[in-house]
Image: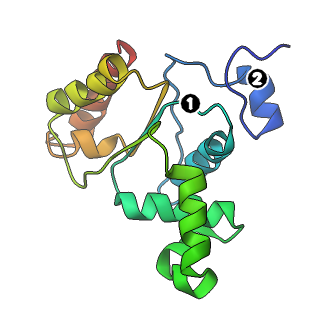
Amino acid sequence: PELTGKPIIFPKLNQMLKGIKQGRFYILCAGSGSGKTTLMKELIYPWLLEEQKAKIAMVFLEEKQKFTQQAFIGIHNNIPVHEFEENPDKYLGNKKITDSFKLLLGHKEIAFFEHFGSYNSDQFLRKLTYLAKVKKFDYIFLDHITMITSGNSTGAESERKDIDILCTKLKEL
């Protein structure tokens, strides 16, 4: 089957999805600590190397922008993400870090949304709408959606309902 979206690095998944399509809503689900964030970065990484770069917004709600950037530099230099984030100077000199940053992230087609903790869902949706409709980002990667609803919920059932409502609204973007 022919690709109809942007290719990803996992052949079987790429074949099943026919690439990642703009305007679609994809969700990675797995247990806590299983590597969803790392997997998402591995999916994004090859796109950062492309000559014709897609406009990518990264909304990683449980980590600072600095750590997201360090993760991509680690991936680029084949260094385990968590090891590199803890001590980048142990693995690479300043010039190599700077060169990797410029190659991967030093262009205007990348945006980061830095926030840690719960967030008002309506405010959050306005920010994502701005990225999608006004700034016209091709792809918006959202990590840790539960951070949006965690401050609103009164219990597990309520949080699941809040996440469902938020996903429905995100799909409307």
Image coordinates of residue 37 in percent, x first then y, are: 51, 52
Mark 1 and mark 2: Cα distance apart in space = 22 Å
Residue in the foreground of this view, choosing between 74 and 152: 74
- Numbered label attached to residue 54: 1
Between disc 1 and disc 2, the foreground one is 1
Answer with mark 1 or mark 2, whichever residue precedes in sequence: 2
Left or right? Give the position of 168 relative to 34. Answer: left
Image coordinates of residue 75 in percent, x first then y, are: 65, 61
Left or right? Give the position of 72 relative to 108. Answer: right
Instruction: Tell me: residue 140, above or below residue 103.
Output: above
Instruction: Tell me: residue 125, above or below residue 113.
Output: above
- Give the residue number, with chain letter if any, for mark 2: 16
- What residue is shown at x 30% (from left), y 28% (from top)? 128
Residue in the foreground of this view, choosing between 35 and 40: 40
Residue in the foreground of this view, choosing between 155 and 56: 56
- What residue is shown at x 53% (from left), y 67% (from top)? 98
